[in-house]
Image: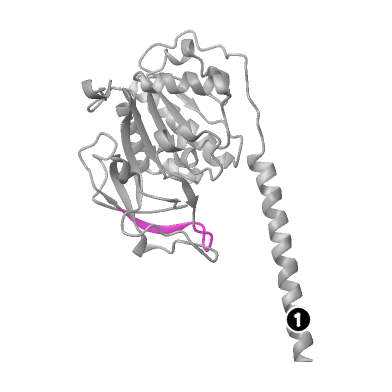
Amino acid sequence: MKRIVRWFLIALAAVLVLLLAFAGFGFYRVYYGKHVYETVAPVLPADLNKPAILIFSKTNGFREDAAVKAANSALAAIAKRRGWTYFVTEDGAVFNPAQLSRFNATVWNNTSGDTLNDEQKAAFRSYIENGGGFVGIHGAGGDPHYAWRWYVESLIGVQFKGHPLNPQFQRATIHVEDRADPATRTLPETWERTDEWYSFENSPRGKGFHVLATLDERTYHPKMFWKDVSMGADHPVIWKHCVGKGRVFYSALGHSASTYEEPLHLAMLEGAIAWAAGLDGEGCQISETAK
């Protein structure tokens, strides 16, 4: 009888594994199998004058709609208060040389999936390398199925590998390494907050990126069910670097809509955009040896 029960449990476990596999495949098809590309450029506002910010929130993959909307509103409010003009869109066709040239920086708000076609990707890469700005927020660096290797290897700089799921949202401690940067000068040295904490295959520090803040894994549980997604002592969550003449900033913070009501988080994003737009802090220059 015990043997029968044991084999029944084994068979049940096998069925559950298969069901999870099918569910995972279905999730992938729904959230990461979309390839929607716009080809007709949108009409930009007539009063779009520099400094101008492009706020881009297209999702061809997973979408946390409440967070996307909350962030768009918060970013627009920052722009208004700072006297920047802005354009909020999910239309990838805006990524053309003529229209990109009208923006000091682009903010990729929780984007996911393959958002641009090949021509748009080429226009964006040229824009960045020739002095444009990029601020990536949370989901912009949290896609496990990147279709554009330049984006992950040169722009974001690291490959996302997972986040906790038991529980998904946890309170943890961030250690701010550079409190003189425009993005982090208002932050405390030790910053406690709740979020969905991303882990990456490696640290961008190894590529020479400037890490602004790291996550203390001793203050939360980096487990994705049975999978360990810890990175160890060096777990960056905010960093910046230059790509050619372009200013590139990424923050892994900001999954939930409520995070766009946090004063410190908003101050960090404001400083990041100001830097990426070339309005605060040091810029990026190509050295003679790199030309």
| Three-letter amino acid code at the position of disc 1 | Trp
Task: Residue 136: tell me if it is visible.
Answer: yes
Tell me what residue is drawn at x 46 percent, y 40 percent: 141
Compared to residue 34, the image places residue 16 above or below, namely below
Of 238 and 268, which appears nearest the observer? 238
Q: Quadrant of the C terminus?
A: top left
Q: Is residue 165 magenta?
A: yes
Q: Quadrant of residue 30?
A: top right
Label 1's element? Answer: helix
Of 32 and 154, which appears nearest the observer? 154
Locate residue 22 relative to residue 211 in the image: left or right: right
Q: Position of residue 64 (x, y in %)?
A: 57, 42
Q: Quadrant of residue 246?
A: top left
Q: What residue is pinned by disc 1?
A: 7
Number of callouts? 1
Locate residue 271 relative to residue 254 in the image: left or right: left
Q: Position of residue 51 (x, y in %)?
A: 35, 16
Task: Residue 53: tell me if it is visible.
Answer: no
Compared to residue 84, the image places residue 219 above or below, namely below
Q: Is residue 158 magenta?
A: no
Q: Quadrant of the N terminus?
A: bottom right
Instruction: Please rate how many residues cluster around mark 1, counting C-alpha atoms within 10 Å: few if below 14, some from 14 to 19, many from 20.
Output: few
The magenta region covers 164-174
Furthest residue toward left: 180
Tell me what residue is drawn at x 52 percent, y 41 percent: 67
Compared to residue 51, the image places residue 194 above or below, namely below
Furthest residue toward top: 46
Of 83 and 279, which appears nearest the observer? 279
Q: Position of residue 58 (x, y in %)?
A: 57, 30
Tell me what residue is drawn at x 22 percent, y 20 percent: 288
Locate residue 237 relative to residue 95 in the image: left or right: left
Q: Position of residue 265 (x, y in %)?
A: 36, 42
